[in-house]
Image (tube, rainbow, N blue to C red):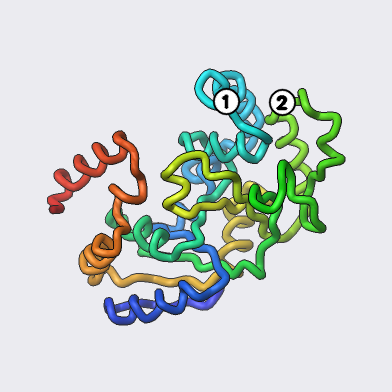
Amino acid sequence: MGSVIRIKTLVELKQLFDELMERNAIFRGVNNKNQLYPKIIRDNDYSKKEYQILKTFEKYYGLYSTANNCWEFLALAQHCGLMTRLIDFTSNPYVALFFCLRNAKGKDGEYIIYALDKTNTNVIYDSIKSEPYFNSKTATLTLDDMAFQIDVPYCDILNKEFKKLSKKTGIYTAKPNYRNQRMLVQQGLFVVPTKLTKESVENRIAEKSQIIIIDDAIRAEALLYLEKLGYDEFHLMPDLDNICNEINHRIICGLK
């Protein structure tokens, strides 16, 4: 596990976040350790059905949306709630703090932010740097690899990608195009696990991250501070479904 910082006051929180904004890092906020893991292995292990899940999604998604390549396809699946291997991160620590604090922690939970230094990661795909694939020493597919695979299903291409990744030991990230306003305002990107086991994910991410634990006593104060800065459900998840969910959430939890 990386170094651990415990934040007990709002003053400490503000000072730390001034520093975090200057770092070359990416962040994930959770309220229990289980949320560090990708959804496909979080509550139950469905990793052996990963190909089946993506194949079924590819059968139907074209009725509602499009994707330019396999990483955009996988990001779309993740965004729509499908169980995938992707883990949501953000380049903005305040966004991670909001998702860390939004829901009350469980009995054995803690409010945790993983701050992962980018120097500990490899870029497997970045839509800004390349189209359709980032061709570098860390990439697993190149343009040449894709030249004769135009009609190959994305799920098959990803299946080959994942097999190549399983032989690697680093931390890989993917940053697809922002397909909607929500992804844009959350400043999101994904960590792509090379192996789908909780032990592997935790060893790769937690050991390379600074771990920030927020004291439960300042949760309400910190959420109010975030709201004043514009980091709340209405701004970070700007669509009508989520606005309705947030109204319900606030009423049920007795929030203003």
Residue underneath mark 2: 153
Q: Considering only vertical position in the picture, is 24 above or below 92?
A: below
Which image quadrant is residue 123 in? bottom right
Q: Residues within 10 Å of mark 2 (few under 14, many from 20)?
A: some
Q: Residues within 10 Å of mark 1 (few under 14, many from 20)?
A: some
**Secondary structure type for disc 2:** loop
Q: Amino acid at mark 2?
A: Pro
Residue underneath mark 1: 57
- Residue 69, percent from left and from top: 68, 35
Quarter of the image where the N terminus is located: bottom right
Q: Considering only vertical position in the picture, is 153 above or below 188?
A: above
Q: Amino acid at mark 1?
A: Phe
- Residue 104, percent from left and from top: 27, 56
Q: Considering only vertical position in the picture, is 17 above or below 67?
A: below
* Residue occupying image coordinates x 27% and y 76%: 10
* N-term mark: 1 or 2: 1
Determine if residue 193 is in view.
no
Determine if residue 66 is in view.
yes
Whole-number angstrom distance, CA of label 1 to CA of label 2? 11 Å
